[in-house]
Amino acid sequence: MQTGIEGFDRVIQGGFPKGTVNLISGPAGRGKTLFALHFFLGGAPGANGHSMYLSLEESRASLQRVLESFGMDTAPLEQDSRFMLLDMGELRTGRGDEEKMIGFLELQEFLQASFAKTPIDRLVIDSLSAVGLHYRSLRELRRELFSLVRFLRDKEVTTVLIAESVEGSGLTRWGFEQFVSDSFVHLGLEETKGELRRTITVRKMRFTKHDTVKHPVRITSNGIVVEPDERVV
């Protein structure tokens, strides 16, 4: 399943294996949402299948602003319901539970109902950090996250999960997200020769012969570009 990110698919043998759950992590400002929006659009407008982007933190208006700033117009793509950009907060407004934190079980129930109406091939959940606020114990959080990942695999939905990490305190927020997912891609920011460079590293990916090199990333007017023939050392 191609990501639509220039250079990145070369690093992972053509794209994410179909039906896998893929974790994208990194501190704030590293390009995680932009990465996920690329995947959401995939090969649009000629792509087959259906894509859903489920935002748990950012508003739909904010995501559309990001898309427009990089020349990605989803309006005509959403008209035939093949591309669904959903703001979970907006959907819950007016139901009396908009202030209640959503958990993984509630999220799974929502997805189950959505999949019954429309078969989804590509799914983005942005982000796990927002759902994690629902839980008081890491044990319960891990158990329900594992249940959601198993549900997504059973549905054979190729999924991107966004996870926010804290600068300088580990690759993921809770330290176990990468173990329940099929792949783990980390976005970073490295200082080399007095210059800060965006980087991407595939730390784990099942079913592919991916490389583990830390590659430079550029943000262009068209979005993310990965340099597969260069490395950051």
Image: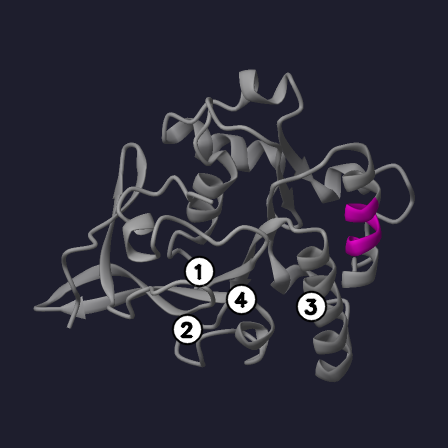
> What separation in Å lies between label 2 and label 3 (alpha carbons)?
18 Å
Q: Is residue 191 left or right of residue 179?
A: left
> What separation in Å lies between label 1 and label 2 (alpha carbons)?
8 Å
Q: Callout 4: few (<14), some (14-19), or many (20+) C-alpha neighbours within 10 Å?
A: many
Give the color scheme: rainbow, by chain, secondary structure or one colour.
Answer: one colour
Question: Pointers 1 and 2 in contact (CB under 8 A)?
Answer: yes
Q: Is residue 33 magenta?
A: no
- Could you say whether the residue bearing mark 2 is in a helix, strand or loop? loop
- Could you say whether the residue bearing mark 3 is in a helix, strand or loop? helix
User: Which of the marked residues, 3 or 4, is nearer the chain's N terminus?
Assistant: 3
Give the extent of the magenta segment.
Answer: 107-112
Q: Callout 1: few (<14), some (14-19), or many (20+) C-alpha neighbours within 10 Å?
A: some
- Check disc 2 and report the residue beneath it: 167
| Mark 2 or 3, closer to the camera | 3
| Mark 4 or 2, closer to the camera | 4
As drawn, the residue found furthest toward the left would be 193
- Check disc 1 and report the residue beneath it: 28
Of residues 172 and 9, the one nearer the viewer is 9
| Mark 4 or 1, closer to the camera | 4
Residue at x 47% of width, y 45% of height? 1
User: Which of the marked residues, 1 or 2, is nearer the chain's N terminus?
Assistant: 1
Question: Pointers 4 and 1 in contact (CB under 8 A)?
Answer: no
**Is most of the magenta stretch helix, strand or loop?**
helix
The numbered disc on residue 226 is: none
The answer to which image quadrant residue 200 occupies is bottom left
The spot of residue 226 in percent (x, y) is 25, 50
Q: Quadrant of the C terminus?
A: bottom left
User: Which of the marked residues, 4 or 2, is nearer the chain's N terminus?
Assistant: 2
- Check disc 3 and report the residue beneath it: 132
| Mark 1 or 3, closer to the camera | 3
